[in-house]
Image: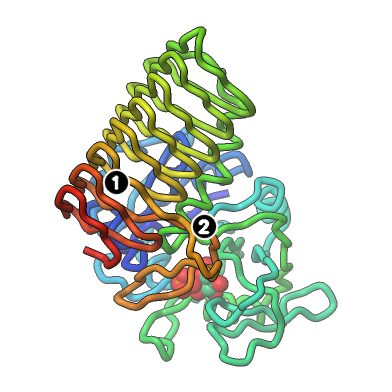
Amino acid sequence: MQTVVLAAGRGTRMRPLTDRRPKPMLPVADRPLVAHTVGAAVEAGADRIVLVVGYESDPLREYFGREYRGVPVEYAVQEERAGTADAVRAGAHLLEDEPFAVLNGDALFDQAGLDELYADGPAVASVRVDDPTQYGVLDVDRGSVSGIVEKPADPPSDLINAGAYCFPAEARRWLDVPESERGERELTDVLERTIDRADVRPVPLSRWLDVGRPWELLEANEWKVAEVAERTPTRAGEVSEDATLRGPVAVEDGAEVREGVTLEGPVLVRSGATVGPNAYVRGASLIGPDANVGHAVEIKNSVLMREAAVNHLSYVGDSILGRDSNFGAGTVVANLRHDDEPVKLTVKGERVSTGRRKLGVVVADGVKTGIDTNLNAGVSLSTGATTAPGESVTRDR
Ligand code: G1P
């Protein structure tokens, strides 16, 4: 089935990690976030991908090229971010007069659920959540979707639209919906039109993750690093005989793990990265391409992007380190509050609860910390920020 993947968003809630790249290109295990979505679509039976791009689209075009796993990829540009229906409309001219699927490009879907969605449309993927107010909420009557309400203050159920749809061919003509209250043209209004004319099934997903905020990038890696490490050869790279590897661990070809290192999976060490000597990396952790983890460094449940370096005597827990960031010797991250309350983080200028008891820091590309820097839980450092030697950082910079 022809499949539209929505990947035009700016990812403002993901700042500062999206200062220089689009959210769909953020690393999740061995590939960009959106490649997991596209890969799952191909696996489910997508025979053509229309990727709707917008903000910073070059890396997306470079990554996918003209085909992905043998399936042709075409691009449509959404000039303005005017909503999900507008995004599909931007790619509609590339669609044949046949049923089509639409997937949010910033979500992870379980494969079995997506397979079912593709097998028997019209359908919408659905999942139960604790707080449905931030989503499209579904009403179901005798096994069919009977209504959908977008971001309701008073949700009719806890069953939400997970952002994966299978529309009938005619829906291409129903894309021109009026602006919603939040000023966007919503795909959920297209779904509403579909419900009026066809039987739409809610397909339950057993696992789903909407990746919008920095800690959700950690959660995405917790999910996918485990999967990828399970199916990738453990010792394709150079691994010292004096290293200890436990659980699902994959050291890619071109990576090096030196003596005295303990890797406790799920851990993925990407090509060109070096770990050790004498380092301790606990899962779920991603040590990105050409990253460096040096002597007496402990990394726990963290993502180190390409060329990130933590070279000496440091602790990094539940954190994200951007490209080419560098932690000076003795940089230590706090990842827990003494009152045991969930750690807060700044999202779109506001401090919000992450719901996580353990969360360290979010560090953008090119950040450099001075030696002996202490970073408090929930601090975020923007692109190129620096800290002085011996500093204790308790606020965003
Ligand atoms: C979109 C849909 C919403 C759905 C959500 C899933 O919301 O409009 O119905 O529940 O994706 O992530 P948006 O991400 O545009 O706010």
Q: From this viewpoint, is residue 7 visible?
A: yes
Q: Where is residue 192 in the image (x, y as percent from the top left)?
A: 60, 81
126 with respect to 344 (left or right): right
389 with respect to 200 (left or right): left
Q: Position of residue 359 (x, y in %)?
A: 46, 57
Q: What residue type is labelled 2?
A: Lys
Q: Name the residue under label 1.
A: 322
Q: Name the residue under label 2.
A: 358
Q: Which residue is drawn at the image coordinates 22% and 58% (left, top)?
A: 382
Q: Which residue is drawn at the image coordinates 71% and 47% (left, top)?
A: 112
Upstream in the sequence, badge 1 or badge 2?
Answer: 1
Q: Which of 305 and 102 is in front in this view?
A: 305
The image quadrant of residue 372 is: top left
Q: Is residue 179 above or below residue 216?
A: below
- Location of the C terminus by quadrant is bottom left
Between marks 1 and 2, how big is the CA–CA gap? 19 Å
